[in-house]
Amino acid sequence: MNKSFVKTLALAVSAFILVSALIIYPKEAFEASLRGLNMWWTVVFPSLLPFFIFSEMLIGFGVVRFIGVLLEPFMRPLFRVPGSGGFVLAMGMASGFPAGAKLTARLRQEGQITASEAERLVSFTNSSNPLFIFGAIAVGFFKNPSIGILLALSHYLGNICVGFLMRFHGSNDRTDKRDKRPHSFKTALQEMHRTRLKDNRPIGKLLGDAVTSSIQTLLMIGGFIILFSVLNRLLYLMDITTLVSHFFSYLLLLFGFSQELSLPLISGIFEITLGSQMTSKVSDSILWQQIAIVSFILAFSGFSVQAQVASILAETDIRFSPFFIARLFHGLFSVILSLLLWKPLSPYILAAQPATSPEGTDPFTALYLFDLLHHYLKLCLSYGPLLTIFFLCFYIYLQMNRWKTN
């Protein structure tokens, strides 16, 4: 019996078990599916769509190439990636998962970076956005905006550490494109103009392609969010999550953590939001332990996000394995940084930590320093579904026009 046949058999048995679980637990699976759908169309779609569309347009207009020429002296020595990686890093931090993978794949398709450079770049440009860290986790789950500062610092600094580490990935590769031209403002403008002429698409065509490509990616993301929301629920109902958590409980105990954090950790390995929420509700653990676990969950990104990234990278020659290894290192770095930052920041965090959460109190009213994120999240929750429906209808209209043309 060869290895390939065993793999086929294992996949077939796993699929059969999951389909059987769907039949046994239809109500729970439906509720989990609705939970994932609600998250996608209220927050994920409206918050990511503008970033995706404008990123596509900036690439087409040559602006990313312009930024790349200017940032080449900075990004190349530090991370062994082209200057355009600075744009990907900034957009990845601002818009969140999986924008870094999406933009890296686009740069690779445009031929602006090599495969090894793309593998290095994608490893440290995928991160959670500030809206989720401060709005959903710090305030929504922990009811303490100060925790968001600690989580954000450990998360983003951990990603930078991954970038430094991954610069050694592909050290024997000599195919990296080194831009040896002078990195002046004039040169950057010339490169931007050259890139736009090379693209040569009218503005209307470029905008239509940007909307179509962005919505296709977001539909794929929505499918994975719903899939893993259902999968996580089914694994819990079949007691598989509980069984695996017993192993993790001994591992946590070895490092001095509460065993009660094992189940939230397993849930977070599959899906970030549920794992973070469950971690915040564990009463038999110390706050710094909860923060460390959430830091790991955010850094690891969950199998749901990793599946989204794998699907995006599958359209190119970028390998997924370096990204997965980078997520493990990111989790390790984030936990270490959260523990190191806990001592200097703990007085502020504990001073803002509520003893109880009064019933009927809106948790978002506690967010004083992050009003912008607060209002943006409120807008997403209020008008996100309408925006999602509008752009889905617009996407159908564009597709129908293309079918008629063809």
Image (cartoon, helix red, strand yellow):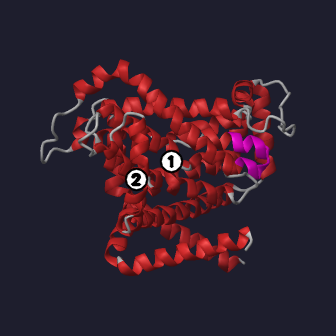
* Picture quarter with the C terminus: bottom right
Task: Tell me the crowding category of disc 2: few under 14, some 14 to 19, or many 20 or more residues within 10 angstroms, Cα based.
Answer: many
Q: Which of the 4 image quarters holds residue 351? A: top left
Residue 174 is left or right of residue 133, and the answer is right
Furthest toward the top, the residue is: 344
- Name the image quarter holding residue 137: top left
Q: Of helix, strand and loop, which one carries label 2? A: helix
Residue type at mark 2 is Ser
Measuring from the top left, give residue 213's x and y in whole percent: 62, 60
What kind of element bears circle 1? loop
In the picture shown, does residue 34 fall above or below 180? below
- The reply to whether the magenta stretch includes residue 111 is yes
Q: Position of residue 52 (x, y in %)?
A: 57, 51
Q: Residue at x 57, y 48 (%)?
A: 99
Based on the picture, tell me whether residue 387 belongs to the magenta stretch. no
Q: Residue at x 60, y 63 (%)?
A: 212
Q: Which mark is residue 142?
A: none
The answer to whether one can see residue 356 in this image is: yes
Residue 42 x %, y %: 38, 58
First in sequence, mark 2 or 1: give its number: 2
Image quadrant holding the N terminus, namely bottom right
Q: Residues within 10 Å of mark 1 (few under 14, many from 20)?
A: many
The mark closer to the camera, 2 or 1, is 2
- Answer with left or right where residue 229 lies relative to residue 195: left
Q: Is residue 42 above or below residue 250?
A: below
According to the picture, the residue beneath numbered tag 2 turns out to be: 245
Residue matched to label 1: 301
* Residue range (magenta): 107-120
